[in-house]
Image (cartoon, grey):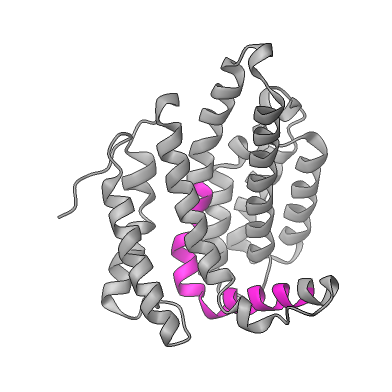
Amino acid sequence: MLPAANAHDLDAYFRVNSQFAKFASDAALKQAMPRVVAADVAAVVKTLSDSQRFLDAPRYRLSDMGALMNVCDKANALVMSYALFDLKGSVDPKADPATVSRVVVQVMERNFRTYQDELELLQPFLIRCLGKEIPLLTEFASSLKPEELTDIRRAGLKQAQQGMFETLYGALQIASNSSLKESYRMRLLRAIADNARQFSSLLTLPVRQQVLTLARSTSETAPTALRKYLKEIGDAMSDRNCIGLCKS
């Protein structure tokens, strides 16, 4: 039995993450990513998707931000390992940028369909992890004196904002894809809705509007079961208050 995680002891998560890396390395030889139909892979993916254990049970403080960011980075790497699988073998290095971009989109769309069972578990964990990170990032930024907000730190905060927006918006685009399983779309939307207020606090008003527009357009054709989550996301993004990181 692995020990329960807390804000100061995430060894269990990192240890199991290392197990996944071995599975991925072995699977690469078979030209496929690890699948949860295999019992050992399913156990690892289940652990790496356990929001209650690694995100909700611990009480994260500002001093834990580095550890939490490490968890989120690894969670993002897991998702992207599925999303970008076989990209190198699909892209002609001599192709023009427009062609490369088109192929990247095609590869990702194919992989999101192929690996729905795995991403349905791993991707919501990433969204929830970022949701936990945002209040700590906000607290850190607000704790800085004006002279401590250097150009490097300002650029780092901007990069974090952009990265979180891209993850959020990309997940919402996936959830709008009617060709994907409803259970996958629902888990994604629930994770976004549960953390929509945190994401909203991070985003500038024009960026919130982009998310709001996508949520509303998705709701028009979404199954009834998904619409309540889209409404929650829309309500959060309709907030016009802009303080903290939103203003940076």
Q: Quadrant of the C terminus?
A: top right
Is residue 16 shown left or right of residue 96? left
Residue 109 place in picture, x, y as percent: 66, 75
Q: Quadrant of the N terminus?
A: bottom left
| Residue at screen point 65% across, 65% down | 174
Residue 166 place in picture, x, y as percent: 68, 52
**Quick check: can you spot residue 125?**
no
Residue 51 place in picture, x, y as percent: 39, 49
| Residue at screen point 51% across, 68% down | 81
Residue with the most extreme bottom position: 30
- Is 2 drawn above or below residue 107 in the view shown? above
Is residue 221 shown left or right of residue 198? right
- In the rendered structure, which segment of residues is drawn in magenta? 102-128
| Residue at screen point 70% across, 80% down | 91
Tell me which corner region of the image, top left, top right, bottom left or bottom right, holds residue 10.
Answer: top left
| Residue at screen point 63% across, 16% down | 148
- Is 134 drawn above or below residue 75 in the view shown? above
- Give 136 or 145, whichever is nearer the viewer: 145
Is residue 102 shown left or right of residue 201? right
Is residue 106 found inside the magenta-colored segment of the image?
yes
Residue 115 place in picture, x, y as percent: 51, 76
